[in-house]
């Protein structure tokens, strides 16, 4: 009782502070976890990007270096002083050291028509003349011939849809400037060198080389829209680009998407569990409060029910003792009242004791074959005297119905139902008790009265323990709210049911039907 006033406050705290606090905490946790995942995602994407970039750099460098190494090898064999020796010196090592060089030319850069002073080709033929004309006619104007003249330079350009790569540098001899031009065969670079240089690429990374128009020259197409690193060849084939798809980018993407879903699901689940947990706690606390209130009502009701018959027993016993009883008839009447009240007392105590047993789970039912009609007759007989005093006729229609059941428990249930009819249908002429077999092979007891009936909204609740109906409080009917709970327990234990019909076919009153199945006897203990 002492914590009564604190209780609503505690519950309010639970509703308005704890529940939102738990939800917010779970949400914050979820958001933090999600942020961390996104950061990790970003970092791993970045690291894949970095790794791919350095891979691409290394690849473009490799080809550049390879071409420049050939240029250097040519330079070592070209001596403008001795132009005639170029053929002998360079061709001797050309296949091994300069595999992509088709021809080496030396031009007199000072002469007006850029006279070709030497032309050494690995495969002399008509293409050489075409190249020579192209060089003098169109390429030279595109070349960078400023200082420092010794510097190795490259021209990478398409002429008439054909890609050309030439390396060039200038030399001075005898006061004249000479231009050394190295003609690289682009087709060889693509078809022989690239497959050699790039064959060790790991299987996951897809790589290709594209020209200035984006046409693939070497390698497979990259997946459209997939992230890729694209890098120009820095010095030699500078109009072309090397593209490398992010290694395992697809897998990474899928993995991160999956991880995000898992994360969201975990956060959602945590929130759901938190909310469900809180709801369960709140409901349990409400239920516990209701039960506590019902229990205290029960104690008050039972005490009252015990007190009233006890006072009449005492009063009539005292009257008998003082011998102030006018005649034998009166004495007999007093004694009968004492008998009736003691019966009520003992049946109430039986009820409470049985209920307590059921509640503690110690009630073991004894199933045996018996005639339900006989058991109902016993219950009716035990209440006949009270019925007479109340002026209620007990009308019976008991058809034999032998089934397997616990006779003592079912008798108690029937007594409770008839007792309720007496209590709530006071002043009505009769109560009907009938027993009949059911189509399912079991049997049914029906106790019908012509009382006030039971409102529809109460018809389910009145089977809960300690619950009493509105008519009980309005008409000040004594009771404890455990009678129907006990009847329901007995019905359940028999695998049967208890149902209410209110109003009955006659338009008023209520009828309780206890239906039992003809079950094989099973010792059942309520746990
Ligand atoms: P109690 O009779 O001690 O209150 P019960 O569990 O036997 O407890 O009954 C629960 C409630 O059901 C009663 O309070 C009453 O409102 C209602 N009730 C039971 N039997 C009848 C009946 N025959 N007619 C009308 N109301 C009834």
Image: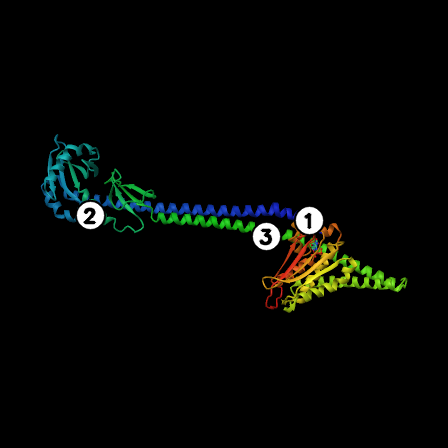
Give whichever of discs 3 and 2 has the lower sequence position.
2
Q: Is residue 479 visible?
A: no
Q: Earlier in the sequence, mark 2 or mark 1?
A: 1
- 365 or 519, which lies in front? 519
- Which is closer to the viewer, label 3 or label 1? 3
Mark 3 touches mark 2? (CB < 8 Å) = no
**Is there a contact, CB below 8 Å, between mark 2 and mark 1?**
no
* Local crowd size for mark 1, using a 10 Å CA cut-off: few (<14), some (14–19), many (≥20): few
Mark 3 and mark 2: Cα distance apart in space? 74 Å
Q: For the residue labelled by badge 2, is the local secondary structure a helix, a strand or a loop?
A: helix
- The residue at the point 60 percent across, 52 percent down is 281
Q: In this rendering, does residue 399 appear at all?
A: yes
Residue 75 lies, in percent from the top left, at: 17, 42
Q: Which residue is mark 1?
A: 6
| Residues at marks 3 and 1, CA–CA distance in whole angstroms | 21 Å
Residue at screen point 31% across, 47% down: 55
Relative placement, left or right, of 57 versus 305 is left
Residue 192 is tagged as 2
Which disc is residue 133 wearing?
none
Q: Which residue is mark 3?
A: 280
Characterize the local packing of mark 2: few (<14), some (14-19) or many (20 or more) Cα atoms within 10 angstroms. Answer: few
Of the pair 171 and 432, the residue shown nearer to us: 432
SS label for mark 3: helix
């Amino acid at each position: 009782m002492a914590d009564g006033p604190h209780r609503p406050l505690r519950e309010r705290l639970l509703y308005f502070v704890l529940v939102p606090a738990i939800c917010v905490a779970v949400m914050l946790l979820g958001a933090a976890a999600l942020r961390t995942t996104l950061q990790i995602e970003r970092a791993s994407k970045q690291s894949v990007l970095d790794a791919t970039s350095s891979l691409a750099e290394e690849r473009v460098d490799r080809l550049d270096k390879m071409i420049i190494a050939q240029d250097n090898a040519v330079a070592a064999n070209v001596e403008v002083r001795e132009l005639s020796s170029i053929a002998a010196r360079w061709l001797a090592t050309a296949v091994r050291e300069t595999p992509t060089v088709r021809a080496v030319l030396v031009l007199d850069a000072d002469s007006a028509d850029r006279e070709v002073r030497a032309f050494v080709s690995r495969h002399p033929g008509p293409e050489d003349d075409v190249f020579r004309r192209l060089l003098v006619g169109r390429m030279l104007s595109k070349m960078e011939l400023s200082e420092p003249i010794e510097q190795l330079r490259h021209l990478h350009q398409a002429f008439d849809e054909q890609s050309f790569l030439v390396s060039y540098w200038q030399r001075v001899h005898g006061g004249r400037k000479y231009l050394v031009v190295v003609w690289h065969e682009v087709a060889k670079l693509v078809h022989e060198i690239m497959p050699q240089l790039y064959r060790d690429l790991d299987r996951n990374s897809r790589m290709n080389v594209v020209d200035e128009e984006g046409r693939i020259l070497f390698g497979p197409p990259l997946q459209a829209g997939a992230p890729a690193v694209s890098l120009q060849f820095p010095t030699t084939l500078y109009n072309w680009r090397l593209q490398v798809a992010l290694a395992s980018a697809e897998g990474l993407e899928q993995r991160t998407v999956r991880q995000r879903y898992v994360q969201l699901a975990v956060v959602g689940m945590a929130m759901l569990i938190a909310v469900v947990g809180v709801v369960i706690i709140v409901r349990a606390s409400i239920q516990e409060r209701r039960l506590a209130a019902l229990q205290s009502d029960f104690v008050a009701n039972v005490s009252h029910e015990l007190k009233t018959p006890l006072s009449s027993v005492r009063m009539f016993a005292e009257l008998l003792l003082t011998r102030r009883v006018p005649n034998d008839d009166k004495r007999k009447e007093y004694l009968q009242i004492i008998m009736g009240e003691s019966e009520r007392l003992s049946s109430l105590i039986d009820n409470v004791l049985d209920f307590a047993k059921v509640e503690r789970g110690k009630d073991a039912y004894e199933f045996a074959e018996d005639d339900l009609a006989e058991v109902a007759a016993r219950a009716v007989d035990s209440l006949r005297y009270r019925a007479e005093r109340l002026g209620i006729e007990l009308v019976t229609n008991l058809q034999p119905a032998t089934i397997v059941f616990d006779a003592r428990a079912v008798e108690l249930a029937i007594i409770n139902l008839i007792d309720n009819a007496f209590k709530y249908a006071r002043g009505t002429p009769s109560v009907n008790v009938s027993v009949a077999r059911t189509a399912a092979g079991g049997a049914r007891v029906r106790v019908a009265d012509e009382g006030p009936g039971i409102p529809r909204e109460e018809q389910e609740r009145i089977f809960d323990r300690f619950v009493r109906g509105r008519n009980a409080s309005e008409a000040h009917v004594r009771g404890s709210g455990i009678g129907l709970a006990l009847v329901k327990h007995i019905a359940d234990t028999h695998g049967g049911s208890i149902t209410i019909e209110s109003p009955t076919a006659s338009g008023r009153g209520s009828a309780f039907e206890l239906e039992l199945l003809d079950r094989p006897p099973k010792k059942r203990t309520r746990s």
